[in-house]
């Protein structure tokens, strides 16, 4: 990962401010228009209001990343870190809102068709979140290694088999890239191994790493996850803290 790419993920650019300013301007314009042309005003408010929320969230994320460039991070071992269902549900809700707006407040055939498509995708996303299909991935840190879990199986990677950990980006979103020695990866159940190897090959052919972690989907800032991974990969002595604390014996029942 080059220094330029890293700075692009943490530096608040002119483009970031411009997108926020344009979204704010059109959101305010929508408030003005809604009194004169209700349909056009509502469509403008929904589209640019959601754009404003996204632009502000990007700026806030980069501000956090700037504060956390140099840090040492640790995690609780033996506990799955699951993807955030709330974030995926919000994405589905945003698609639903845009789709319903286009269907209800526009008359052009193209916009209605687009609205129907977005509505269908939004419904599919919400249903998938409810059923646990889009939020089933998880990470788990243990003294022996890291687990990359999925609904149909998991990959267990010893810490010494991790060959590279780096920051990256995917469609302007921060990711953490993890490269490993594929021969040391253990799949559970074993029948999951062929699908796992195919997935790792696709990731190597795209982002260039065996595992690509979209940190926002876990609700973690990329610098925090990156620092934790680098620490346990480079400092074997730190891995002992990932052991699950022993459970206290149950006391006598209260009288």
Image (tube, helix red, strand yellow):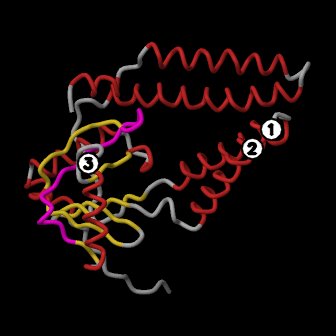
Picture coordinates of residue 20, whole percent (x, y): 56, 20
Which is nearer the eye, 106 or 185?
Answer: 106
The alpha-carbon separation of the residues under discs 2 and 3 comes to 35 Å
Which residue is at 71% across, 21% downward?
A: 27
Which residue is at 75% across, 27% downward?
A: 45
Q: Is 115 rendered above or below residue 239?
A: above
The numbered disc on residue 6 is: none
Of labels 1 and 3, the one closer to you: 1
Image position of 40 (left or right of 223): right
Which is nearer the eye, 252 or 29?
Answer: 29
- Magenta stretch holds residue 222: no
Image position of 212 (left or right of 3): right
Query: Disc 1 vs disc 2: Cβ atoms closer than 8 Å?
Result: yes
Residue 130 visible, this orientation: yes
Residue picked out by circle 3: 205
Element type where label 3 sits in the image: helix
Which residue is at 25% across, 22% downward?
A: 4
Quadrant (top left, top right, bottom left, bottom right) of the N terminus: top left
* 2 or 3: tag closer to the N-terminus: 2
Residue 101 visible, this orientation: no
Which is nearer the eye, 228 or 21?
Answer: 21
Element type where label 1 sits in the image: helix
Magenta segment? 170-186
Picture coordinates of residue 28, whole percent (x, y): 74, 17
Element type where label 2 sits in the image: helix
Residue picked out by circle 1: 109
């Amino acid at each position: 990962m080059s220094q330029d790419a890293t700075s692009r993920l943490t530096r608040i650019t002119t483009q970031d401010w411009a997108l926020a300013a344009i979204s704010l301007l059109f959101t305010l314009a929508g408030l003005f228009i809604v009194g004169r042309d209700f349909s056009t005003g509502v469509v403008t408010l929904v589209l640019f209001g959601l754009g404003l929320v996204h632009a502000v969230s990007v700026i806030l994320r980069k501000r956090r990343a700037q504060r956390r460039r140099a840090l040492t991070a640790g995690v609780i071992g033996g506990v799955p870190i699951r993807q955030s269902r709330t974030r995926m549900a919000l994405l589905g809700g945003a698609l639903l809102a845009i789709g319903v707006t286009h269907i209800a407040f526009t008359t052009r055939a193209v916009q209605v068709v687009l609205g129907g498509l977005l509505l269908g995708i939004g419904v599919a996303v919400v249903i998938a979140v409810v059923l646990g299909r889009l939020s089933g991935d998880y990470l788990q840190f243990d003294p022996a290694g890291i687990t990359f879990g999925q609904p149909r199986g998991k990959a267990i990677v010893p810490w010494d088999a991790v060959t590279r950990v780096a920051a990256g980006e995917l469609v302007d979103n921060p990711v953490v890239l993890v490269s490993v020695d594929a021969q040391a990866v253990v799949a559970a159940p074993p029948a999951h191994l062929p699908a796992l190897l195919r997935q790792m090959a696709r990731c190597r052919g795209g982002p260039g790493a065996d595992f690509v972690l979209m940190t926002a989907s876990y609700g973690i800032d990329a610098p925090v996850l990156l620092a934790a991974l680098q620490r346990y990969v480079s400092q074997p002595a730190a891995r002992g803290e990932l052991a699950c604390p022993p459970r206290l014996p149950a006391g006598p029942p209260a009288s």
